[in-house]
Image (tube, rainbow, N blue to C red):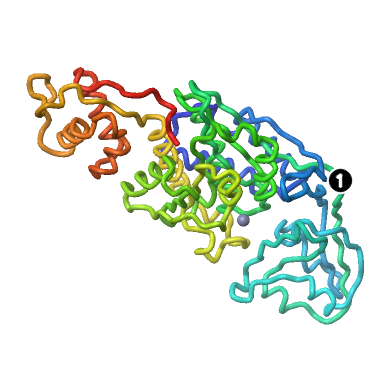
Amino acid sequence: MSGPASGSGLRGEAAGRDILALMTELFPICRSITGAGFRETLGILKRRVPLEVREVPSGTRVFDWTVPKEWNIRDAYVRGPGGGKVIDFARSNLHVVSYSVPVRRTMPLAELKAHLRTLPDHPDWIPYRTSYYREDWGFCLSHRDLLALEDGDYEVVIDSTLADGSLTYGELFLEGRTGDEILISAHACHPSLANDNLSGVGLAAALAGSLAGARRSYSYRFLFIPGTIGAITWLALNEDRVGRIKAGLVLTGLGDAGRLTYKRSRRGDAVIDRAAAHVLGQASPPGRVLAFSPYGYDERQYCSPGFDLPVGRLSRTPFAEYPEYHTSADNLDFVSARALGDSFDKTREILDILEQDETFVNLSPKGEPQLGKRGLYAEAGAEEMALLWVLNLSDGGHSLLDIAERSGLGFEAVRKAADKLAGAKLLARRAAKGAAG
Ligand SMILES: [Zn+2]
C-alpha cells in the first residue's frame, strides 16, 4: 500500500505530506491523454482507492470529437555531430512533444530547429508541449541548451507508436444515502508536472480515501481523466445520468504557495459556488473567487451549455498567473505539503457545507425565546450571535448557508448553533436533504 488506508482522518500538513508522497511516486511517469503512462498512473491510484479503469476504443465518436489513437513512447533522443546525446527523453519526459509520431532520421541543424521548442524568457526551463490532434513531432529543451547546439548533422530518434488502441480513464463511485451526486474531476494526462496535474490527482485520491470512511448524504463520483477529451468522453457515455450531479469541483493547481482561487460554475450561484465562496471568504488570508469564463480546465466541458452542470474549479494560483506553468519548473519543489494540506482542508470544508446545509423553522418565533432558562445563554460574542441569527432567519426560507452568508459568521458556528437550538426544541427541521442545486 502507498500511504495510509482509506478513510484516514488526516488533516492539514499531515494530509499534505500524504498527498505529496503519492505525487512523488507518480511524478516520473510519462503520461499523455492515452497510453501506458495513464494506465500505470491509475494502477498506482488503485492501490489506495478502488477505482474502476475504463477503456474507450480509438475512433469512438463523442459529441463533436473522436477518441484519438493511442500514443506510447519507449525512448527518444537527439545525437549531435560530436556523437553524444544532446537531448535525451531518459533525462526528462518533457523533452518530447507529447503525441510525437515516430522518427528515425539524420538531418542538419537548420531542419531540426524547426522542431525544437524553448522558452527564451526562462532559459533554464524545459517547456511542456503537445500535438494531440495534428500528427507532428518535436523536442522541447532549455533555451540555454539550444544556443549550445553546433552546426552539423543530428541523428533524431523518437521510438513511439501512434495506433488504434483506447483512451483510458479511472472512475470511482462512493454511494451515499441519496442518489444525488457530487462530481470530483481531475485531469491526469500530464507527464512530469507537479502542480498542474498531480496536485489535483493526489488531492482527489486523498479526498476519496477520506470520504470513503465518512458518513455521506451525497454520492460521490471521482473521475481521473485525460483533459478535455476525457471529460467530453465521460459526458458522452453518461449523458443519461448527469442530472444527478448537484455539485462538482474540478481540482488542479492546488500545491503552490499562492492563495486559494475558486472559479464559479457557469450558473454562478449554484450551492457549490456559494459554499466555496463562503469557505474562501472565511479563510485567512481570504481566497479569491473568479467569475465563470469559457476557458480553463474541464469545467469548460461540464459547463458547456448543453450540460450547464453546477461544477466550479478549485486551484491556488490560476494557471495563467505563474510562469512555472507547463514548464519543467512546475516540479515537486514548486509544491509543498503545507499548501496541499490547506487545499485538502478547504475542499473538505466546502463539501462539509454541502453535506450539512439544511433549513430549520423557529418554533418560538414571537419575540425572542428566553435562552437562559434553557441553558443556552452564551457569553456575548460570536456564539451568542450565531444563536440569534439562526433563530431570526430560521423561518423555513433560509438554509444554514444562507444564514452564514448573511451574518458573516462561519458555517460551522451557524451549524453548531442550530444543533443546540434543535436540541432545545426551539428549531424543527424543514426539509429533507438533497434539494441542493
Ligand atoms: Zn495543463
Q: Is residue 218 above or below residue 247?
A: above
Horizontal and vertical percent for residue 305? 58, 49
Q: Is residue 59 visible?
A: yes
Horizontal and vertical percent for residue 110? 83, 80
Foreground residue among 97 and 292: 292
Foreground residue among 208 and 43: 208
Q: Quadrant of residue 184?
A: top right
**Residue 314 placement, left or right of 390:** right
Horizontal and vertical percent for residue 220? 54, 31
Q: Residue at x 77, y 38 (%)?
A: 56
Residue that label 1 marks: 164
Q: Residue at x 86, y 75 (%)?
A: 81
Q: Secondary structure at mark 1?
A: loop
**Residue 304 placement, left or right of 100:** left
Q: Residue at x 60, y 31 (%)?
A: 48
Mark 1 vs ligand 1: CB below 8 Å: no
Q: Quadrant of residue 134?
A: bottom right
Crowding at dot 1, Cα within 10 Å, few <14 / some 14-19 / many 20+, comes out as some
Looking at this view, name the residue that lies furthest to the right: 105
Quadrant showing the C terminus: top left
Quadrant showing the N terminus: top right
Foreground residue among 324 and 271: 271
Q: Is residue 30 visible?
A: no
The amino acid type of the residue labelled 1 equals: Asp
